[in-house]
Image: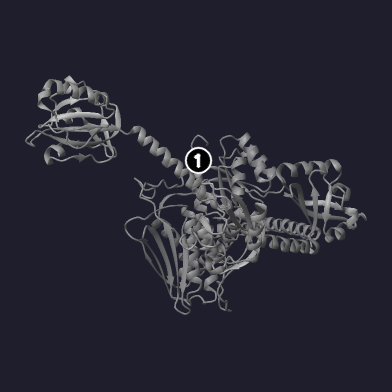
Amino acid sequence: MVCQVGKGKLSGPMKLKPQEGVEGLASWFDVSLDHVADGVITVDEQGRVAFMNAAARTMCAWDVDEARGLPIEDVLRLVNEDTRAPVESCVKEALRDGTAAKSEPHRLLIAKDGVERPISSNAAPVHDKDAAIIGAVFVFRDVSEHRFTEQVAKRALWYSEKIIATLREPFVVLDDKLHVQSANEAFYSKFRVSKEETEGRFIYDLGNGQWNIPGLRSLLQEVLEKSSVRDYEVEHDFPSIGSKIMLLNSTRFESAAGEKGMVLLSFEDVTEDKRADVKIQASEIRYRRLFQTAKDGIVILDMQTQKIMDSNPFMTELLEYSHEEIVGKELWQLGFFRDKSAAQVAYKELEMSSYIRYDHLPLETKNGDTAEVEFVGNVYHVDGKKVAQCNIRDISERSRLERKTMDQAAALADLHRRKDEFLAMLSHELRNPLAPILNAVLLLRLQGRENPTQQQAVAIIERQVGQLRHIVDDLLEVSRITSGRVQLRREVVTIGGILTHAVETARPLIKQHKHELTVSIPVEPIHLNADAARLEQVVVNLLTNAVKYTEEGGHIWLSVAEESNECVVRVRDDGEGIAPEVLPRIFDLFTQGERSLDRSQGGLGIGLALAQQLVEMHGGRVEAHSETGRGSEFIVRLPLVPAPLQSADSQDLQIAVPLLKSLRVLVVEDNVDTARSLTLLLEASGHRVRNAYDGTSALEEALDFRPNVVLLDIGLPGLDGYKVAKWMRHTLRDVMLVAVTGYGRDADRERSREAGFDHHLVKPADFSDVLSILATVSDKAM
């Protein structure tokens, strides 16, 4: 058997004498290995455990009797320290190759009890006298403590290196001959030199003599004599980094090896600081110049004493005090604030928030003059002292202009209000004569006996009344829309019905000008979430505009289609077109094409503006295209909505048909023609009618006549229609009250509802609407 054990490692061969006996040899071998600090495991030629010394048993947590005969892999569980993957011991390698083997690093031994420890190990084969491999010896050592010591040393080295690396100031260590022994990384980086170019060289020879500076020579000479020198300023133009101002600090010391006369030399680049100081000085000069020449007053307050430390010349001009009179005073003593208590309140706010502002602060000067100033205070620190800079601007003239502007705005608002009132009154006054005219026309039609000339006259009157009513409606609409008082009453409708009604409204005007109208509406309904009346008004305005600017006998096209989830309505004509200079502002209020003497249909220039506003209120847009002499096209685009389960337009409409019953109707109207014409129409329809021409007589007639329906004007002499309606609603509970008035604003309708009216008709009211309302009177009310 060839094996030798010494100091825990296998070394060269050891020959044992056979005569000593196998048992004695084994006993001696076991005892010897039990005193070895390293773990020792012997295996036979099959890799089965034959022996474990005490250290191996402890580290593996195996009893030798339990382990004997087991494969070494079962007893010696090894894993890679990084990957935790199982690894084999080097025993197999020693048995296979017949040579000593060493394990790879980073091996963990996992004991039977689960304890893990890093190990280093090697193995060697055991030969018999004939050099045949009869087993192997595996020797391993717990390197935990070594690993810990190694990590501590690395950490200490890393810590030292990091400390040195964080030193931002460049430094070098010189020997007593002023040769560079070492330098830190900051030195190499700062002066752009390498370690090889630096260490061992004479300091004055570095960088082709860039350190041969008289100031540095004086410093080092002084250090050699005095041991240390601090903050020695040197300015030099270095070839590698340019002109710099350096603060040099140097001291002598003794090295750890006992070398005396060593010199530590550090460099602090203060170039930027010095230049900043120069800039600060220049800035202070500029500040003082601005301070002195500013056209705003500036005072500097001491926040502790609340007294003025400084003021600029503009303050002396504004306050009429001298600089000497201002300094040392408090603000309230110079006419700021009402008194000292008011100044204290402002000062506390300034202390708490570091900022204060007054936009209109009254000020009284030394001579008793008054001014209005803008006062802004900011707190900051100067040389550790808290001060406040207060900027004061005389805004007396600005305040005067602001007040003037406010007065003008109030006057404009009042003018706007009076304009609305004027338009409302104008429409009322215009509607009043229209109502009897329209009623008279209807009476003539009811006669049915007029000759052709009378028929033409009636048609002309009817058409012109319609035009006047349209103009009055536009006047009111422009006021409502521009002031944002229009409210849309939206519901799901089809565009086809809206276009049909619009065409019927515009047809008399189209026939008058002998225009050919082509209407294209798809069979499938197109649904919108819209106010049908408002959209009808849009289309009527576009058709009316086309009629006005198309020669007699011309052609007008009206079409609708779906395009990209939009409903697109087009109104096109072959008229004179729109001039290029007018087209960009065609939708502005009061814009219209050039008028000529023969153009009687010029209008007021508000129809297109209303159309655009109403379309945009529906979430759509309208555009105009035209070439002079080649007609115009207006395109309205509106968002589509999904078709309802049952379209409102497809439902059976409950059309109000005049009932074959006679009602008692009281007509209250101060315009005799209107009252008389409406009475004649009602009587012709089979109803019993009485008249009243003022509020008081209306009450008397109501008590005597007990009407089923009252057609009541609002603007009555004496008691107005609202008061009459309230009285009738309280006294005649079942009576139907219908306002027939020239006031048609939303506010007027709301007020009539509050007064108790059931319906609100605007003059000139269509008589068919009156009959429809009368048809709704229940038998109970009769």
Residue at the location (41% across, 63% down)?
A: 569
Q: Find residue 427 and report its image quarter.
A: bottom right
Name the secondary structure under disc 1: loop
In this view, the residue in front, 767 or 265, is 265
Residue 512: % across, % down? 48, 70
Residue 400: % across, % down? 79, 59
Q: Is residue 4 left or right of residue 365?
A: left
Residue at the location (71% across, 56% down)?
A: 414
Category of crowding for the residue at label 1, using alpha-carbon neighbours closer than 10 angstroms: few (below 14), some (14–19), many (at least 20): some
On-image quarter of the N terminus: top left
In this view, the residue in front, 288 or 496, is 288
> Would residue 542 be seen by someone viewing this image from the given angle?
yes
Residue at the location (87% across, 52% down)?
A: 327
Residue 185: % across, % down? 50, 55
Residue 108: % across, % down? 27, 34
Q: Is residue 528 above or below residue 303?
A: below
Q: Is residue 186 above or below residue 737?
A: below
Q: Is residue 51 left or right of residue 652?
A: left
Residue hosting label 1: 777
Instruction: Give amino acid for label 1.
Output: Val
Residue at the location (19% across, 36% down)?
A: 123
